[in-house]
Image (tube, rainbow, N blue to C red):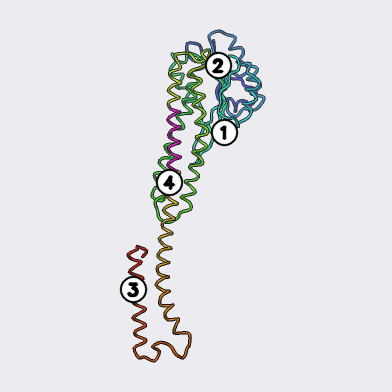
Amino acid sequence: MNPIAPSVSGAADTAMVVNCVAYRTDGTRSGDISIDAISDVLKEPDTFVWVGLHEPDESLLLKLQDEFDLHDLAIEDAQSAHQRTKIEAYGDSLFIVVQTAQLVNGNLAFGETHIFLGPRYLVTVRHGASLSYSPARRTCEHAPELLALGPSYGLYGVLDFVVDNLLPIVRDFREELQELEQDIFAATFNRSTVRRLYDMQRDLMTLRLAVAPMQDVISQLVRLHPQLIPEDLRVYFRDIYDHVFRVNESISAMREMLTAAINVNLSLVTFGQNEVMKKLAGWAAMLAAPTLITSWYGMNFTHMPELSRPWAYPLIIVIVIGVVGGIYTGLRRAKWL
């Protein structure tokens, strides 16, 4: 089959169609085709089609539905970019939704990828923060003996690409937490440190909600759907499952570390404040003693104890110094000062 030149109708469709490629069943690339030519290509034996879309509009999805005979409910879900991670079977095809994540200017952004898998087609629809799957496509094309197993190997390449992009995100969170350790163990309160720890914990919780359901999706691909997933490919999907499990465990460990870090920081700040309050209370006690004693001599009574004695004033000074010294010694032994 000769490659058919792309002729997607309209500039808007051209922007939304990232790739539309036909492959022979021996795993070799036949060439780029147009969306309108898909049904014609599929009429030829020993071919399958891989389509990559980015935030398509309703008309383009309806066109794909006509070309691949996709289920109405799957198309309805694909039109919305707010689906949970899931896998659904429609006859001899699968509809899969996976969450994607990407660091954008130091902030974690989330997106979705909707995947249609059939015996002779693979369609990926990207929404939101998601890298292009062109590298995954090139990797699959470099292994034609595996791509000859059908579109399911392309599905493996896409899912493996999604999961592998999660590992650097977790690693960046771990490195940032190590950089924050000095601020975490500081005795003074730093609002920005606690705020950043909270933001990291919130992002990891959202990331875990995206990653954890993927284990069930990959598990189904390993065990079920023999009409679409050849036995030779199940070992590759098991490898993805191991990666997802590792990412999920890393996220859970990081969340526990962040919770402990927040608690340690707040405990240290509370301990430091208690130490300051103890010192203030100690000094207040030492000031209270001379204030109490000398206040007796400010009451202007005619008859005061030792008021007419020449040694009364030095005696009071000695008594005040002794009382204050005793309080100071006691507080030092109690480690309040």
- Comes first in the chain, label 2 or label 4: 2
Q: Residue at x 39, y 72 (%)?
A: 286
Image quadrant containing the C terminus: bottom left
Residue 323, compared with residue 147, is above or below; it is below
Residue type at mark 2: give it. Val
Checking the image for residue 49, the label placed there is 2
Q: Nearer the viewer, mark 2 or mark 4?
A: 4
- Would you say residue 241 sits in the magenta stretch? no
Residues packed near mark 2 inside 10 Å, few (<14), some (14 to 19) or many (20 plus): many
Name the foreground residue: 51 vs 252.
Answer: 252
Q: Nearer the viewer, mark 3 or mark 1?
A: 3
**Which secondary structure lies at badge 2?**
strand
Query: Disc 3 to disc 2, how far (Cα)?
Result: 91 Å
- Comes first in the chain, label 3 or label 2: 2
Checking the image for residue 128, the label placed there is 1
Name the foreground residue: 58 vs 15.
Answer: 58
Which residue is labeled 4 in the image?
261
Does residue 57 appear left or right of residue 217 in this picture?
A: right
